[in-house]
């Protein structure tokens, strides 16, 4: 177990009808001027927009609004949000939506507070120390952004998708009502399930030893998500399944399932190249393609851990004479599960061919400036080999 | 799953050598005058006292000190600490020790900030809304006070031991170095293991349904603690085992293993009467006596849950025809485990007879003013029956 810092200051209000408390919550922190930030309209369809407006009005919180956040949120809209905040003297960004809206809000908050373009934070040139407060009302169980230190933005100038971590990115409070995810499509629900699982799997598969407690928590979370995922896909209004996915989404990326580990999110890095290059690719769907390929490439270098994953999470019987069979069974069950919840598992399912492998691999190495740490180090050639296994 | 609020703002620094950062951490929050609060001298024996003083001096944090906190911390010392803080203009209480020192610090902080005797908070007459900041350096894995909202104090005037919860009780930051627990005796280590397990077990055994994720996290935590407990008792300087116990101690009582549940800590309530009445009884040792008796009294009223506990945590095979056998096997294995780590499991092991059962039961019902919610409501008579099963 390696030394770690754990810091999850975000206050969570979880459960039915909690969205009606948003105005009162903001006011309790002494804020009364906010940017109400949202996506491309689904919150209006489900009536949430009106509920938020009513709650803000009732609490005496004034707001300006900016909708239009797209999946893979864009830097240009962030700049627009910053202008609005500066002009209107906004004190807090209220993000109502899924991970893209939340990340867009975090980027706006970072830019406004520091009076600068936030892209240098994303690209790692500058370190974010402080930010404007962000509050969230979540409508999609996936990114974990509602509790995480992470913010991922796409710069249309070159289609770079970059994420960065800073405790200043952690929201002040987040409101999680599972009912607000009832209307999420089966496909988006599937994407969310994969994203949640991957946040834990990226941490789980690392070379650190002696993390028994973190292992057990990670495995328990994965088992819960796998079960709840099946139910939510079949019955989108099952409260308990939606609640499990929503809370697991937060816990999977707030640090808990990585405590005591030194990890690197290499599958996310490769997926960022994929959905950065092909804007139509949903992040979770991309991950469902990346993980099985990565696992098949890597399992021989971490056989005991892949066996632990297969036996504890998927209930595979350990084959002590042929442990590679156990490991592969776990990978196969993961891939089959992803397919069963409607996810693509090969690039062909996304209508993507080999033509950009080289370019994506080069970008993933920051044009030769880095390799990806893993059980074996991943440089351009290895990344291309993994992309080839996605075909 | 019921609605819940999750709020764990305490920043955790976990790992080797982290205690040397205490001065720098305090300073980073802008404080420079603290009360250094500790127990009856063990921190001097292990050299920690000098390390803390050096770190405070180096960071330019001035301090006054108050040692002498005993197990089951007393209100009289809290009053003494308050006087000192008020006289010296202390801004933060630094608690270095185990749960008793931390709780004593929390009570001092509550009293100083609110300019009042803190006992009304403990006895539930007043609600604690704000408090002076408390920082901790932990030397005992047990109470979870380093991250919890809880504070338990004993009033020598009548020997009432009372705990209360408030988010204002959550420490600002806590430093957790497992090496600082190497010198904890086998007996105190055992008491800590039971306390950690009980914080999760009290939450686990409640009537709420559909808490699959919280269940899996709780079961994973319990399995880790059971394994690490065996190792730490046998080899007190096993870093990984000590680390598992320390981090599990924090997670077990910070809310995580109770999210989505409505629970009541009835075994703790009964144990508080025991160690409130018999000051020589260590809290964890008392709990090791209370839980098996409570479980034997209660299992028939929650058979499926006791079976889930037995099968998932202890690996008992489910006997579908005689589920009560499965449930009892889980209880028996818990009791045997407590005994194996050197804990008493009967009142006779503590040299306590039946003479005070009536008085303790009366106190536990707040002199007839409350009953304890449970699978079946516990009033004075039921509490006496449970005490009788401890004989």
Image (tube, coloured by chain):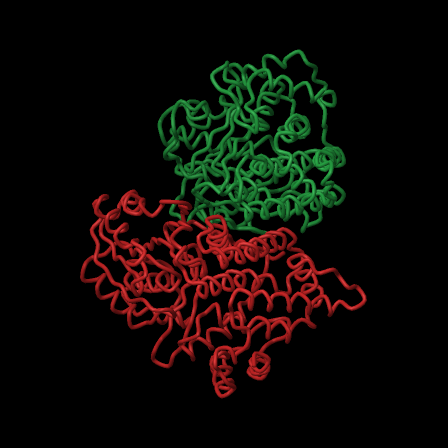
Chain colours: A red, B green
Q: Furthest-bottom residue in view?
A: A355
Residue A390 percent across, percent down from the top left: 56, 78
Q: Position of residue B171 (x, y in %)?
A: 46, 41
Nearer to the camera, A172 or A387: A387
Q: In the rendered view of the protein, which quadrant contains the C terminus of chain A?
A: bottom right
Q: Is residue B87 at all visible to an observer of this figure?
A: no
Taking the spot 25% from the left edge, 57% from the top edge, the residue there is A35
Is A365 situated left or right of A17 in this image?
right
Q: Quadrant of residue B159?
A: top right
Q: In the figure, residue A81 lies in which quadrant?
A: bottom left
* A90 or A2: nearer the viewer: A90
Q: Residue at x 73, y 69 (%)?
A: A325
Residue B67 drawn at (x, y percent): 54, 31
The picture places residue A353, in percent across and down from the top left corner, at: 50, 85
Q: Nearer the viewer, residue A236 or B242?
A: A236
As drawn, B254 above or below A320 = above
Where the N terminus of chain A falls, by quadrant? bottom right
């Amino acid at each position: 177990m390696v030394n770690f810092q754990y810091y999850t200051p975000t206050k969570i209000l979880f459960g039915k009808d909690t969205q009606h408390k948003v105005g009162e919550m903001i006011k309790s922190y002494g804020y009364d001027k906010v940017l109400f930030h949202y996506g491309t309209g689904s919150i209006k369809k489900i009536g949430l927009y009106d509920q938020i407006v009513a709650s803000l009005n009732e609490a005496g919180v004034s707001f300006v609004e900016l909708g239009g956040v797209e999946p893979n949120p864009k830097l240009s809209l962030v700049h627009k949000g910053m202008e609005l905040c500066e002009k209107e003297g906004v004190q807090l960004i209220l993000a109502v939506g899924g991970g893209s809206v939340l990340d867009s809000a975090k980027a706006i908050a970072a830019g406004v507070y520091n009076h600068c373009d936030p892209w240098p934070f994303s690209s790692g040139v500058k370190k974010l120390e402080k930010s404007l407060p962000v509050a969230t009302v979540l409508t999609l169980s996936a990114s974990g952004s509602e509790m995480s230190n992470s913010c991922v933005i796409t710069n249309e100038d070159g289609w770079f998708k970059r994420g960065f971590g800073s405790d200043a990115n952690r929201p002040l409070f987040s409101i999680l009502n599972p009912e607000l995810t009832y209307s999420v499509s089966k496909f988006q629900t599937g994407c969310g399930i994969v994203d949640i699982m991957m946040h834990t799997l990226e941490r789980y598969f690392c070379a650190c030893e002696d993390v028994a407690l973190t292992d057990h928590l990670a495995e328990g979370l994965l088992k819960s998500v796998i079960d709840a995922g099946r139910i939510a896909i079949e019955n989108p209004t099952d409260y308990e399944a939606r609640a499990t996915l929503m809370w697991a989404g937060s816990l999977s990326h707030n640090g808990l399932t990585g405590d005591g580990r030194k990890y690197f999110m290499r599958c996310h890095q490769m997926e960022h190249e994929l959905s950065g290059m092909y804007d139509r690719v949903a992040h979770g769907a991309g991950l469902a393609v990346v993980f099985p390929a990565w696992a098949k490439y890597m399992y021989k270098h971490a056989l005991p851990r892949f066996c632990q994953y297969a036996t504890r999470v998927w209930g595979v019987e350990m084959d002590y004479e042929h442990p590679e069979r156990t490991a592969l069974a776990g990978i196969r069950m993961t891939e089959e599960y992803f397919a069963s919840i409607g996810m693509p598992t090969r690039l062909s399912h996304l209508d993507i061919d080999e033509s950009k492998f080289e370019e994506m691999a080069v970008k993933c190495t920051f044009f030769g400036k880095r390799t990806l740490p893993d059980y074996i180090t991943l440089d351009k050639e290895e990344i291309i080999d993994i992309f080839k296994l996605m075909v």
